[in-house]
Image: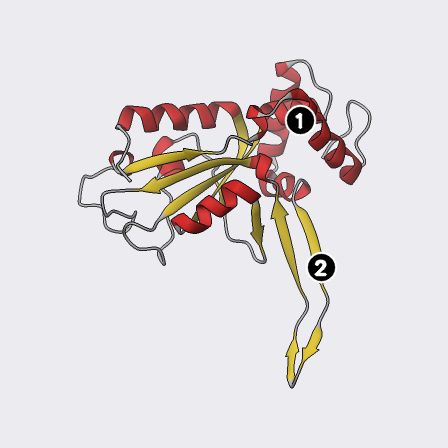
Amino acid sequence: MESMPREKIEEIALKILYSGDIIAKHGTSVKNALSIINTGFDFQRTSFVMQVSKKIEPLCGYGWKENGPNDSANVIIEIPREFFMDLLHMSDIDEYNEWIQNIINKDMQQTVLDNVTKFEFIEAKKSGSFFVPPSFKAHIPQEFIVGAFIWCNGKTYLNLKEGESALDNLNFIPNERFYLNLPSEEKNKLLDEIRQKLGIEDKGKSL
């Protein structure tokens, strides 16, 4: 896969940063990144980091040390502004800004992301002579996966040459099923599911 021009990567990054304030990133292999784009993100432990700044390079160039050249990707998870405004029946951007600033001030971005994640508790069990302790698995819906930045040119974040930018060595695979790309009826179906999960019906209720 060839890298995109730096200007195109910057354009994609700015669009992501503009569209929302609850953003996370997950470094993985290219195969896993494509699976996450197609099905959502299943995990059994915390395996992503929140993107708290509005800086482009940390957003695009995140990586995982276990992934080598030509097999390194950075999946972008985002709960977009439009989703929250739809979910909480907000029509005024100033109202949203006040709400999200309160979330940021209290450092609750992770908590908000957890609230739209589906968790399943797995009970302890015995397997032969082995005891398997209790655990949980979680699923972030496909609709909150923006896409994935793919490292190109045999590079990863670990082996950039001095002065070299991640932005010169990336491609991007979008998720056509990301929330902002959905038709209204599919957005409404997802909104109804999450409102039911969280018990949100009336304007003014919080996550």
- Examine the rendered structure and indicate whether residue 63 appears above or below residue 163: below
Q: Amino acid at mark 1?
A: Lys
What x and y, as percent, mark residue 106? Answer: 61, 37
Q: Quadrant of residue 3?
A: top left
Frontmost residue, 26 versus 108? 26
Q: Amino acid at mark 2?
A: Phe
Asked whether residue 76 appears in the rendered view, the answer is: yes
How many C-alpha atoms fall within 10 Å of the one at disc 1: few (<14), some, or many (≥20)?
A: some
| Colour scheme of the picture | secondary structure
Task: Identify the element where label 2 is drawn.
Answer: strand
Frontmost residue, 187 versus 12? 187
Quarter of the image with the C terminus is top right
- Examine the rendered structure and indicate whether residue 90 appears above or below residue 54: above
Residue designated by label 2? 121
* In-image side of 118 versus 31 (left or right): right
Q: Quadrant of residue 123?
A: bottom right
Asked whether residue 26 appears in the rendered view, the answer is: no
* In-image side of 80 versus 69 (left or right): right
Residues at badges 2 and 1 in contact (C-beta under 8 Å)? no
Q: Going from the N terminus, do you reach mark 2 or mark 1 first?
A: 2
> Residue most toward the bottom?
129
Q: CA distance from mark 2 to mark 1?
A: 27 Å
Residue 187 disc label: 1
Residue at 59% in and 35% down: 143
* In-image side of 7 versus 26 (left or right): left
What x and y, as percent, mark residue 80? Answer: 57, 28
Residue at 76% in and 31% down: 192
What x and y, as percent, mark residue 150? Answer: 35, 41
How many C-alpha atoms fall within 10 Å of the one at disc 2: few (<14), some, or many (≥20)?
A: few
Quarter of the image with the N terminus is top left
